[in-house]
């Protein structure tokens, strides 16, 4: 279990004790995090087959460090995790609706084949066998939740290889995923993006849309709450939004993965304003040097 995972579980446990019961979504997240934590423990530290030269070449060419074929995964473990994740989703029909029976069966984990995982990783259409009869958004969320502990393990092993000032791209330097959260660091207020897939963090320009690259200040804006702890960045060009936490305004320790759930009201607010999350295929994962 990573340090952050342990802290999040402890914080949720404390909240549950204080309030008597967690909100339904946080209750679900706690169960999901426990599944991911067990996967992390079984997976351990990934073996890295990338040479220093390969790492440097990919970064210089603007390529993420991980291609799908670089992932050395035990697929029986991945499928066990997928079965557990599907069961967790199925346990909350109030949140996600009814999960198809084929995913609720014990053998449903085998639907996440290596081919299906590669299609998800590269932003391509999933095989019909796994997607038929399943809502696309729910299926994408299940696969992401399944692969997150494995991708995060690689991210922890590789992130120190990234020269932050040289990267500053709109996609993750580790896995090529898009950001779904950001933060302003305490010291200088520099903006950092957080990968939606592996939780890697990387520095990015304050005055640029991280999705379409728009730098026209007349079409970029942000909203903030009364305490100025949270921001909602919006872009009029692509109509996407990005949530942010201003660490300069925070006192207790902020656990960024947990903030995805603590800030769901910002997602609702963004939709009310006519903005949406970034849903296009991930960048930088196609097969190039």
Image (cartoon, grey):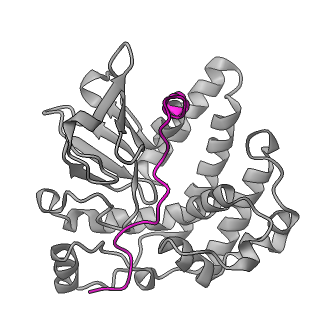
Q: Position of residue 14 (x, y in %)?
A: 57, 27
Q: Is residue 52 visible?
A: yes
Residue 99 inside the magenta-drawn segment: no
Where 57 falls versus 168 (above or below)? below
Q: Position of residue 195 (x, y in %)?
A: 39, 55
Residue 275 inside the magenta-drawn segment: yes
Closest to the observer: 253 or 190? 190
Q: Quadrant of the C terminus?
A: bottom left
Where 154 falls versus 183 (above or below)? below
Q: Position of residue 18 (x, y in %)?
A: 62, 18
Residue 190 lies left or right of residue 229; in this view the side is: left
Identify the residue at horizontal 63%, vertical 42% (top origin).
Answer: 30
Closest to the observer: 263 or 84? 263
Q: Is residue 110 visible?
A: no
Residue 164 lies left or right of residue 122; in this view the side is: left
Residue 276 lies left or right of residue 228; in this view the side is: right
Identify the residue at horizontal 47%, vertical 38% (top origin).
Answer: 275
Closest to the observer: 40 or 270? 270
Identify the residue at horizontal 32%, vertical 19% (top origin).
Answer: 228
- Secondary structure predominantly adopted by residues drawn in magenta: loop
């Amino acid at each position: 279990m990573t340090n952050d995972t342990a802290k999040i579980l402890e914080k949720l446990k404390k909240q549950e004790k204080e309030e008597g019961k967690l909100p339904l979504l946080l209750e679900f997240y706690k169960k999901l995090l426990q599944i991911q934590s067990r996967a992390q423990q079984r997976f351990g530290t990934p073996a890295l087959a990338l040479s220093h030269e390969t790492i440097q070449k990919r970064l210089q060419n603007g390529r993420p460090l991980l291609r799908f074929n670089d992932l050395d995964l035990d697929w029986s473990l991945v499928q066990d995790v997928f079965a557990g994740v599907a069961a967790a989703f199925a346990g909350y029909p109030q949140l996600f609706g009814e999960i198809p029976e084929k995913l609720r069966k014990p053998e449903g984990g085998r639907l996440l084949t290596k081919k299906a995982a590669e299609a998800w990783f590269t932003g391509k259409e999933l095989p019909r066998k796994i997607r038929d009869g399943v809502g696309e958004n729910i299926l994408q969320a299940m696969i992401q939740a399944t692969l997150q502990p494995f991708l995060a393990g690689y991210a922890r092993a590789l992130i120190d290889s990234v020269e932050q000032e040289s990267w500053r791209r709109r996609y993750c330097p580790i896995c090529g995923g898009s950001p779904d959260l950001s933060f302003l660091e305490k010291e200088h207020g520099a903006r950092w993006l957080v990968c939606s897939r592996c939780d890697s963090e990387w520095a990015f320009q304050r005055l640029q849309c991280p999705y379409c690259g728009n730098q026209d200040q007349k079409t970029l804006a942000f909203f903030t709450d009364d305490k100025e702890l949270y921001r909602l960045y919006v872009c009029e060009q692509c109509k996407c939004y990005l949530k942010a936490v201003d660490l300069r305004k925070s006192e207790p320790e902020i656990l960024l993965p947990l903030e995805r759930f603590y800030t769901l009201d910002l997602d609702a607010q963004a939709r009310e304003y006519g903005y949406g999350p970034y849903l296009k295929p991930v960048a930088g994962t196609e097969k190039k040097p």
